Image (spheres, rainbow, N blue to C red):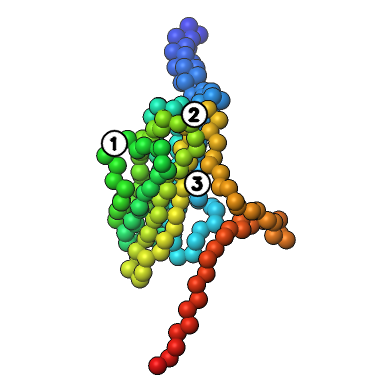
Amino acid sequence: MKKNFLILTPLIIVMGLHANSKKVTQEEIDKVASGTTEGHYQKPGAPINMSYKSIKVDTNETADVNITLTTTAQSGTIYAMMTHDDNLTLIGNVDENLTFNILPDQKSFNINLQATSNYNGLYYIRLLTKIDKGYGPKLRSFAVPVYIGDNPKPKTRSGVTFMKATSGENISVSKAVETIEVIKDK
């Protein structure tokens, strides 16, 4: 009995410490913004998906932004052109034009960034991705939110009217200019 007690006691203590170390507070969960396009609508012909995790920070603090691009293509090249909102600064030597070669054993590509701002707000890092599988390029765009400050508000557009379709979907009505040119045969 004493022998079993001596053997089991350290094991139970280690298991207790391990279980306690896995607790994550609600505050830590609320400080991370994450999302994915996996399982959602995908543009036909552009087999690229994106997942992200972005740490919410205060002004003048550094936010870690981790983006993962995945594809179902067997071969080809993914090109990603990155832009970001004004007042959001990407830290470090960030290449805004990225290229990833798709290999049979590698279909997931990570982009790890750090961003900061002097102003509260909801900012976006935009990716325009292009995949060339040998028979013409296919495009897909993504937007990754970066939260700076307490309760950041998204930028609003003025002069935009929203209407509802019969299905209940919001429709944005914007001003447009159309030019029609008549081409005459010679």
Q: Amino acid at mark 1?
A: Gly
**Which of the two residues, 144 or 22, is positioned nearer the viewer here?**
144
Q: Amino acid at mark 3?
A: Thr
Q: Residues within 10 Å of mark 2 (few under 14, many from 20)?
A: some
Contact (Cβ within 8 Å) of mark 2 with mark 1: no
**From mark 2 to mark 1, how far is it between C-alphas?**
21 Å
**From mark 3 to mark 1, how far is it between C-alphas?**
25 Å
Q: Secondary structure at mark 2?
A: loop
Q: Secondary structure at mark 3?
A: strand
Tally the marks.
Answer: 3
What residue sits right under mark 1 in the picture? 92
Between circles 3 and 2, the one closer to the viewer is 2
**Which of the two residues, 159 or 99, is positioned nearer the viewer here?**
159
**Where residue 88 appears, x then y in whole percent?**
40, 37
Residue 63: quadrant of the picture = top left
Q: Amino acid at mark 2?
A: Gly
Q: Between disc 3 and disc 2, whose residue precedes?
A: 3
**From mark 3 to mark 2, how far is it between C-alphas?**
23 Å
Q: Residue furthest top?
A: 2
Q: Secondary structure at mark 1?
A: loop
Q: Residues within 10 Å of mark 3 (few under 14, many from 20)?
A: some
